[in-house]
């Protein structure tokens, strides 16, 4: 019995040990599994974290690359825009673009220069605030103009000729987004055309005038001779009438002499002359004691030239005399000279101006607006200037008249110059 109890106790003890062993084993396996799972979770979290950081790093790198590309694209766009702007501002033609409401979106420097626009801020302004007729009429009607020619008054009142093109402004899809006006200043070309036409007319007129003047002079001489004989035989009451006839005959003879002088071929006596001194002398002699006339003689560096001193003195005397006669109540004369691509002299007066539409006629012989003028003064001036290879132009607006003479640089003496 006792042995059985001992065996039973031993069995229970062994069973307890075995159970405890299995419990310990189970706990051990549980611990190991937990540790394994723990390490696996930690490893997975680390992988996720590492992957996230790697992705963030790559995204930041791509972001930096995109930023560089964006900056390059912006720089390229700015460069292209700047290049296009440089082209726009450098072209000699005037360019103005408008939006659909005809507000100005672009205007280049050539356009401002040609139209005498001094305002800095023109973008955003309505076309009627900046431009004048007839350009405003063309824009209002939204006409398409190809190689049109118009007369235009600039912002300063100067009359110019414009050759222009006006077309709708379209985007890439062909939709109309505004208007674009492109133009060039044809004033000099028109002036040269007028000069050439005038030269041809004067050449033909000169050939005819010599014969006509000679034919008139012979009977005028006969009339003058008989009138002098008559003056010696008439009674005193009739003598004033005869003297009036003699005076008119002398006037007509002077006109014929001027006409013959104009018609004959000009032979220049070329010498080196001081143009500045000639102009100053002419101004001083004509203006003289006229205190009501202010004379401003402005000279750049004017070189000496080769020309006919007598004829050039006659030309400038006539021009300055005309300026003084245009200001019977006084005014101002501005004489400006400069040497650049041309040797240019301009004479401006503040007289009554020249009526519109006769600028092309005033250099024709016998065309005059004066009551007692012969109409040969400016014709002779034109002939003298042309005989020196130059050109003469006239501009008149707002009561101011400017005669502009251009001599070629070939007249400039290469070895001498004078300071103003």
Image: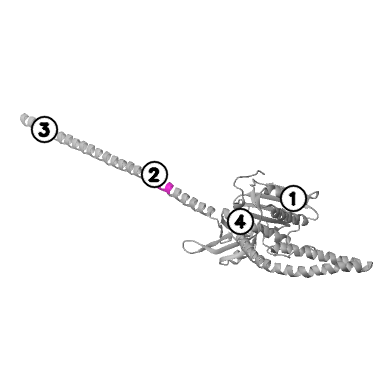
Question: Foreground residue, 33 or 258?
Answer: 258
Left of 57 or right of it: where is 271? Answer: right
**Of callouts 2 and 3, which one flags the residue occurring earlier in the amino acid sequence?**
3
Mark 2, residue position: 64
For the record, the magenta segment spans 63-72
Q: CA distance from mark 1 to mark 3?
A: 148 Å
- Choose mark 2 or mark 4, whichever is in front: 4
Dominant secondary structure (helix, strand or loop) of the stretch shown in magenta:
helix
**Of callouts 1 and 4, which one flags the residue occurring earlier in the amino acid sequence?**
4
Mark 3, residue position: 14
Q: CA distance from mark 2 to mark 1?
A: 76 Å
Left of 229 or right of it: where is 36? Answer: left
Residue 283, numbered circle: 1
Are the residues tagged 2 and 1 within 8 Å (C-beta)? no
Q: CA distance from mark 3 to mark 4?
A: 121 Å
Q: Is residue 65 magenta?
A: yes
Q: Secondary structure at mark 2?
A: helix
Mark 4, residue position: 114
Question: Residue reaching furthest right?
Answer: 236
Q: Secondary structure at mark 1?
A: helix
Q: Is residue 259 magenta?
A: no
At 40% from the left edge and 45% from the top edge, which residue is drawn? 68
Residue 247's x, y, as percent? 84, 64
Question: Foreground residue, 387 or 108?
Answer: 387
């Amino acid at each position: 019995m006792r042995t059985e109890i001992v065996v039973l106790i031993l069995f229970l003890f062994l069973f307890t040990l075995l159970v405890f062993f299995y419990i310990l084993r189970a706990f051990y396996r549980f611990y190991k599994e937990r540790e394994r799972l723990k390490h696996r979770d930690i490893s997975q979290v680390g992988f996720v974290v590492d992957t996230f950081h790697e992705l963030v790093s790559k995204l930041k790198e791509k972001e930096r690359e995109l930023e560089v590309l964006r900056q390059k694209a912006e720089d390229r766009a700015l460069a292209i825009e700047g290049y296009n702007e440089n082209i726009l501002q450098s072209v000699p033609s005037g360019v103005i673009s408008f939006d659909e409401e005809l507000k100005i979106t672009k205007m280049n420097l050539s356009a401002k220069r040609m139209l005498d626009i001094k305002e800095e801020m023109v973008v955003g302004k309505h076309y009627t605030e900046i431009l004048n007729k007839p350009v405003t009429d063309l824009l209002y009607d939204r006409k398409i103009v190809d190689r049109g020619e118009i007369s235009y008054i600039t912002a300063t009142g100067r009359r110019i000729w414009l050759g222009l093109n006006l077309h709708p402004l379209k985007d890439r899809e062909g939709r109309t987004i505004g208007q674009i006006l492109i133009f060039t200043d044809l004033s000099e070309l028109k002036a040269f055309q007028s000069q050439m036409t005038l030269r041809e007319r004067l050449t033909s007129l000169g050939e005819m005038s010599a014969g006509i003047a000679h034919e008139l002079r012979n009977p005028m001489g006969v009339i003058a001779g008989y009138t002098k004989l008559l003056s010696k035989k008439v009674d005193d009451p009739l003598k004033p009438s005869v003297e009036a006839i003699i005076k008119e005959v002398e006037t007509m003879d002077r006109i014929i002499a001027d006409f013959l002088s104009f018609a004959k071929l000009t032979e220049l006596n070329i010498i080196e002359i001081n143009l500045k001194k000639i102009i100053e002398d002419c101004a001083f002699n004509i203006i003289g004691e006229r205190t009501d006339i202010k004379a401003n003689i402005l000279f750049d560096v004017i070189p000496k030239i080769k020309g006919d001193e007598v004829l050039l003195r006659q030309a400038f005397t006539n021009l300055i005399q005309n300026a003084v006669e245009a200001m019977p109540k006084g005014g101002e004369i501005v004489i400006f000279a400069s040497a650049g691509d041309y040797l240019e002299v301009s004479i401006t007066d503040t007289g009554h101006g020249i009526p519109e539409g006769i600028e092309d006629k005033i250099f024709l012989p016998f065309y005059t607006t004066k009551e007692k003028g012969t109409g040969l003064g400016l014709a002779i001036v034109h002939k003298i200037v042309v005989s020196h290879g130059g050109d003469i132009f006239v501009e008149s607006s707002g009561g101011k008249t400017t005669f502009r003479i251009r001599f070629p640089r070939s007249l400039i003496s290469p070895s001498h110059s004078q300071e103003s």
